[in-house]
């Protein structure tokens, strides 16, 4: 039976740190956070963009075996699900090419999100708007998805899926999904850190919430990958463009939010647990946290434990040493004096 107006959907936003290429580790991470979400009584838990492959996977997606392994991981995620729906990002292959694949390289790939529940993959959404500017080159790897207004019944609420760039356009995928009857939008992301970007992200998503008149749950990853840093900052906007929950920046967590469905302006849902709204760091603290996270993940994910820094006595090497200590701990940073 469908819920009454002004009901609640308990959503978990899994702000996680995937490893690009390490599908087995990512699968274990997903299983851990799904268990946490189930313990918290979530109706749905959402993971970031391309969580199973790691984001950005770049040329790994050109290896058919890698894509097949990420699909097999998705099937394992689905097999373990119960009543708590799981939304997770993965690399999908066009159905006709999954069957007829003969070359080592997949032909037509999609940046995809699957919704899994009760032991099955209930549906798959393909990202429609592919960014191809700045640090993004998704057109090189992926085909755009077609209009997808599929709605998923989760605890009696009509839920729609979208991926990152899909939410940045007015009258885009979310507007069409709302017209089809969506009540809550789940938007999964791999959005890199920019010291000016956090406010733009929130204002963009808040605008979509107001335009569509439905809540939007925005989940982002938190990790360093090569030259990119992802800062998290996952949040939920209600149907009136208000941030009702926000995860901390630069930290892994499961943010659990009772998302109000069908509320009139000014009303408060009964039975809703108050969610945390983490403060946004000031600009200097954001930059330091980004440098530390990028350094820590680069070192740890490449299997190193310690670093050696040449200390000239100048401000440059002193700052590098300070960032390294913040990232790794003083016991893992070794300075070599190099006086001029």
Image (cartoon, grey):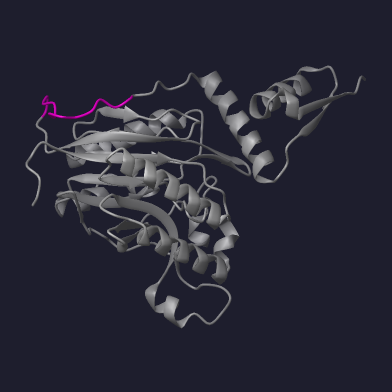
Q: Tell me: residue 68, above or below residue 138.
A: below
Residue appearing at x 76%, y 19% in the figure? 318
Between 43 and 40, which is closer to the camera in this rendering?
Answer: 40
The reply to whether residue 201 is visible in this rendering is yes
Q: Is residue 17 left or right of residue 174?
A: right
Q: Does the magenta segment cover residue 267?
A: yes
Residue appearing at x 53%, y 45% in the figure? 134
Magenta stretch: dominant secondary structure: loop
Q: Does the magenta segment cover residue 277?
A: no
The reply to whether residue 172 is visible in this rendering is no
Q: Determine the image quadrant of residue 170.
A: top left
Query: Could you tell me residue 211's position as x and y percent?
Result: 20, 39
Magenta range:
265-276
Query: Could you tell me residue 132's position as x and y percent?
Result: 49, 52
Residue appearing at x 41%, y 54% in the figure? 89
Q: Determine the image quadrant of residue 80.
A: bottom left
């Amino acid at each position: 039976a469908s819920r009454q107006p002004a009901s609640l959907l308990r959503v978990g936003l899994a702000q996680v740190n995937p490893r690009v290429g390490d599908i087995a580790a990512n699968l274990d991470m997903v299983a851990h956070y799904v268990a946490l979400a189930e313990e918290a009584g979530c109706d749905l838990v959402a993971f970031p963009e391309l969580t199973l492959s790691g984001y950005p996977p770049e040329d790994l997606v050109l290896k058919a075996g890698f894509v097949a392994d990420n699909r097999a991981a998705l099937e394992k995620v689905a097999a373990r699900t119960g009543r708590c729906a799981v939304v997770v990002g993965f690399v999908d292959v066009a159905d006709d090419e999954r069957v007829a694949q003969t070359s080592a390289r997949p032909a037509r790939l999609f940046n995809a999100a699957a919704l899994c529940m009760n032991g099955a993959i209930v549906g798959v959404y393909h990202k429609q708007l592919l960014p191809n500017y700045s640090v993004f080159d998704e057109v090189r790897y992926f085909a755009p998805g077609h209009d997808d207004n599929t709605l998923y019944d989760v605890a009696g609420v009509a839920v729609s899926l979208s991926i990152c760039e899909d939410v940045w356009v007015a009258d885009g995928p979310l507007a069409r999904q709302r017209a089809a009857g969506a009540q809550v939008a789940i938007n999964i992301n791999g959005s890199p850190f920019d010291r000016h970007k956090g406010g733009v992200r929130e204002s963009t998503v808040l605008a979509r919430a107001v335009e569509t008149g439905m809540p939007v749950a925005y989940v982002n990853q938190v990790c360093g990958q090569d030259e990119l840093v992802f800062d998290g900052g996952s949040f939920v906007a209600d149907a009136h463009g208000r941030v009702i929950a926000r995860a901390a920046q630069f930290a892994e967590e499961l943010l659990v939010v009772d998302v109000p469905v069908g509320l009139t302006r000014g009303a408060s849902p009964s039975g809703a647990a108050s969610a945390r709204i983490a403060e946004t760091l000031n600009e200097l603290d954001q930059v330091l946290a980004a440098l530390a996270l990028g350094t820590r993940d680069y070192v740890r994910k490449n299997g190193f434990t310690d670093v050696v820094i040449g200390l000239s006595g100048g401000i440059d090497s002193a700052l590098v040493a300070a960032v390294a200590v913040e990232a790794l701990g003083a016991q893992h940073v070794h300075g070599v004096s190099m006086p001029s």
